[in-house]
Amino acid sequence: MAVEKHEFVSLLGPSGSGKTTLLRIIAGLERPTQGRVLIDGEDVTDLPPHKRGVAMVFQEFLLFPHRTVYENLAFPLRMLKLPRGEIEARVEWVVGILALRGLEKRYPNQLSGGQQQRVALGRGLVGRPKALLLDEPLANLDRELRQEMEVEIRKHQTDLGIPFIYVTHNQEEALSMSDRIAVVRGGRIEDFASRTAIYDHPRTAFIAQFVGRSNRFTGTAIVTGGKVALDDGDVRIETAARPDIAEGDPLVAHVKNEKVQLRLAADAPAAATNALKATIRYVILRGAYAEYVLGWSGGEIIASRPRSEAEFTQGTEVVCFWNEADIDLYPVTEDGR
Ligand SMILES: Nc1ncnc2c1ncn2[C@@H]1O[C@H](COP(=O)(O)OP(=O)(O)OP(=O)(O)O)[C@@H](O)[C@H]1O
Ligand SMILES: [Mg+2]
């Protein structure tokens, strides 16, 4: 995995997949049993953490409770034995960019969660690292503050022009900030691609399940006349034939919630493929979107529609349908996913 100098990269994966371990290997806190770590072309695998020129921000902010904001920020520089004037100048610099002015004399327990998080970020940046490694730094913040901090962190990364490698199990965080996302699963990188590629064209069924919200169907393949169909008995999901799928193969298909379209059943009978008849069970309002939870003969399906479209009420009989191009289809692999 190679990260470019101006990139914001996320390591996204479920709990226990190895994200923190990989970050600790890059930082020098963990020794790899295989492979090398290169920074700026230099092999740093055998260097201790403080000689690598990278900094790490942890999930638990790890501020010193009995030291002021100023002392917390100055600490890494004192470790580097920098001259006093240089320390003051650098602390002044992070206090400025992270909007901490006026808080220098406070103790961590006199700060809000967001302010504490900014001090932790400042402590990572104060040494002017070649790269910043962040391990779920927003996990302890509430949703609103987290979204504000996402914008702020991305802004700092862009302004500083250094790579940020950001660990999260939260797909929204990864999608909101990253240039590229590495999806980590069971100690392996399952795909490393732009955030739009990861979201729009998930390379594996696992990624389709983990990123975005989608409806999942399973069945066996029917291959005819340039088409492949997944038939699960209740619905037929059909798209262009693929060289990696043969007749009878077990398949899994994902259709993202926002790709499921709705029409009144009275207006149009359900087509035999890529469509099904359903009844609206609940409508969840999500601001600009309405999320329809629908019941059909095969179970439940969710459609997420912009509020600018016609709205449907609970109990309405509808037809759900989707475009061929909006189907993510995968052969089922040995591990059943
Ligand atoms: N020092 C260690 N020795 C042995 N196994 C470890 C060690 N540290 C972590 N592990 C194991 O390695 C796997 C990956 O752990 P890691 O902390 O990297 O996961 P993670 O992706 O960061 O998960 P989370 O989202 O829960 O933080 C886990 O199964 C964990 O139990
Ligand atoms: Mg972790």
Image (cartoon, rainbow, N blue to C red):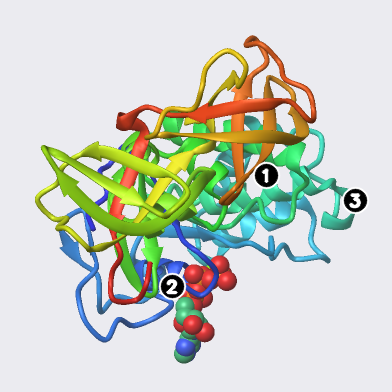
Q: Nearer the viewer, residue 142 or 109?
A: 142
Q: Is residue 196 left or right of residue 107?
A: left
Q: Nearer the viewer, mark 2 or mark 1?
A: 2
Q: Position of residue 52 (x, y in %)?
A: 33, 64
Read off the residue under disc 2.
18
Residue occupying the far right of the picture: 110
Which residue appears at 71% of the width and 16% of the height? 311
Could you give the CA–CA distance between mark 3 and mark 2, rounded to whole angstroms? 34 Å
- Residue 16 location (% of width, % of height): 51, 75
On the image, the x and y values in percent for residue 305 come to 61, 23
Of badges 3 and 2, nearer the viewer stands 2
Tell me, yes or no, if residue 166 can be seen here.
no
Kind of residue at badge 1 = Arg
* 260 vs 263, nearest the viewer: 263
Q: Residue 139: which quarter of the image?
A: bottom right
Figure quadrant of residue 39: bottom left
Quarter placement of the C terminus = bottom left
Residue located beneath label 3 in the image: 110
Three-letter residue code for mark 2: Gly
Measuring 51% from the left and 65% from the top, which residue is drawn there? 14
Q: Assess mark 2: CB under 8 A from ligand 1?
A: yes
Q: Residues within 10 Å of mark 1 (few under 14, many from 20)?
A: many
Amino acid at pointer 3: Gln
Q: Secondary structure at mark 2?
A: loop
Left or right of 154 in this view: 7:
left
Q: Residues within 10 Å of mark 2 (few under 14, many from 20)?
A: some
Mark before the other along the chain sequence, 3 or 2: 2
Residue at image point 73% right, 25% down = 316
Residue drawn at point x = 74 percent, y = 42 percent: 143
Report if the CB atoms under discs 3 and 2 are less than 8 Å apart. Answer: no
Q: Is residue 272 above or below residue 254?
A: above
Q: Which residue is mark 1?
A: 118
